[in-house]
Amino acid sequence: MPILHFTKGERFFPMHVEDYVQQSRLMRVPQDDSESVVLQKNVAIEALNAKLPNGAYLEFVSKDDLRKARLKPLHVKRTSSKSHRLTYVGLAGRVADTVFRSANIFRSLVPAGVSDAAAMKVRQHTVDKQPVVYGRMVEDDSWVVLQYYYFYAMNDWRSHFAGVNDHESDWEQVLIYLDKKSLSPAWLAYATHDHHGDDLRRSWHDDEVKKEGLRPVVYVGAGSHASYFSKGEYLMSIHLSFTKLFTTIQRRLRRMARLPYDQSGFELPFIDLAHGNGRKTVEKDDFKLVEIDKSMRWVHDYRGLWGLDTRDNADGERAPAGPKFNRDGSIRASWADPVGWAGLHKIDTASELDERGRVKKIDTYVDASIAELLQEIDLLNTARTPESIAQIAAIEKKITELKQMQVALKDSETVRSRESADSHSRAHLKNPAIPLEEDLPSRRLFLNAWALVSAPVVFALLSIASIYPADDRWRFLFFGAVTILVIELFAKRNLVRYLILYAYIFVVLVLLAMLANIVVAEFFVGFAAVFGLLTLVSLYWNIKDRITLR
């Protein structure tokens, strides 16, 4: 069973689903998308079955729970990121981040205080109760898969660790792949945000896989509960639909400037902390292993959500479905085909590789035997006696039998080209999760300060420029933009590398601004008000992030 290492400040740990369900209400979103209706209070686990209507979900935190939490808030010491998340992207990303955070007011998010109320409720009803991991074993022709499922009452990544999202309930999983013939561990796969396929898995013998004895170590993301092979801080970038055009332009400009691609564009940065400096499960008794069997109808039949359905169009703040189903009711790939989910159908087990080696040896031996028999036929052909003709016929029959056996062996061998289970154990990785490198303290101090104020400074510049005297407006905008870019380049310590890129971008922006000046000159006062508001909003969000992680 894997060992979990949590980060300091984590408030939610794997728990028994029955404890969660009993404290929840069973709700339903009507087809007309009106206010949700209560189907059942004090829910029994048996109620989660196939008979429930579409749109069913569990609600863990009630309005009464919210009121109690606000009267007596929880204070938990937590770890923080070594650098502000905005230091890992460029100026464009910080500006886009302000727009994204501001646009959240139009989304259906988990209400403020829900994560605190959930933490209080979990603490109240699960005191001294043993954490639970749910297990499942799956076999195919080559592999035995051990699936470990962990259920958390809440994902509080956004509200508690300045991450992307919050949602009630959270299902995470870790998979271990055993050679079916020898039952020796060969691969592991950890569920990690939007990574998929080959990038999810590592060889059992990979140096990145930490083990205590024969048990693999999992570093759990703070609040997000994503699983990592190494401790550290991980940068998760979001690409928004409205920034796709700008991202495409930025990439083309980079190619024109012959600069490598990095995260200085319009990606929105979020840090997932997996420091491993908090609670950890070491002993086998730290977890109660519950095997998933056919009697668990809540696994096999319940297709609803396991927490609040916020009806968020982006799905990021909607609760997940169970271990078997996606939110839309379809079966998860990791459940239906855990081998293919991690890209292992193309991989031979060590036993299969041994078998292939044995077949090749036999094939070589058969070729040598046939060559010797053909030499005997050549010698017998010189005599051409009735006895030699009979001997040649017997030898030819033997050669035919050997070739038939050779063809049968080749047919039984895997004809697909596969990777070795031992060699090239990292060759399959294309975009793996890699912890961030630590910055030097001097650089971190200045870059953190600039990341905090750079987007507000940009909006302030645009706000002032909008009401600046028309004769000097472009001069003011030009010198202001140059000053900001010089500070940005100095903070990033990549002056030469970015100078050409920002020159291209500046030309594009100036052309757009000139066009805007021609079309909407009379609206500059309105622009000033909008950019002035964005200045304050940007500063508010950035400072709030720092306060959250203190």
Image (cartoon, grey):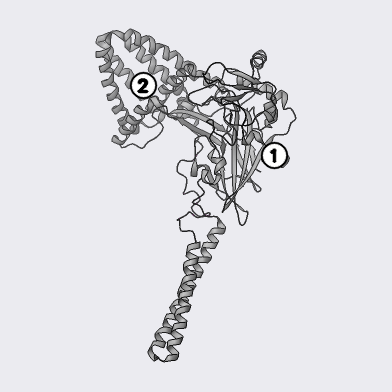
Report the residue marked by disc 2. Answer: 484
* 283 on left or right of 451: right
Tell me the CA gap for discs 2 and 1.
57 Å
Q: Is residue 105 above or below residue 44?
A: above
Amino acid, disc 2: Ile
Q: Position of residue 413 (x, y in %)?
A: 49, 61
- Range of magenta residues: 414-433
Report helix, strand or loop for mark 1: strand
Q: Is residue 169 above or below residue 462?
A: below
Q: Measuring 34% from the left and 27% from the top, which residue is drawn there?
A: 245
- Whether residue 229 is visible here, answered yes or no, is no
Q: Quadrant of residue 4?
A: top right
Amino acid, disc 1: Val
Report the residue marked by disc 1. Answer: 290
Q: Quadrant of residue 112?
A: top right
Magenta-colored stretch includes residue 519:
no
Relative to the observer, which residue lies in front, 97 or 305?
Answer: 305
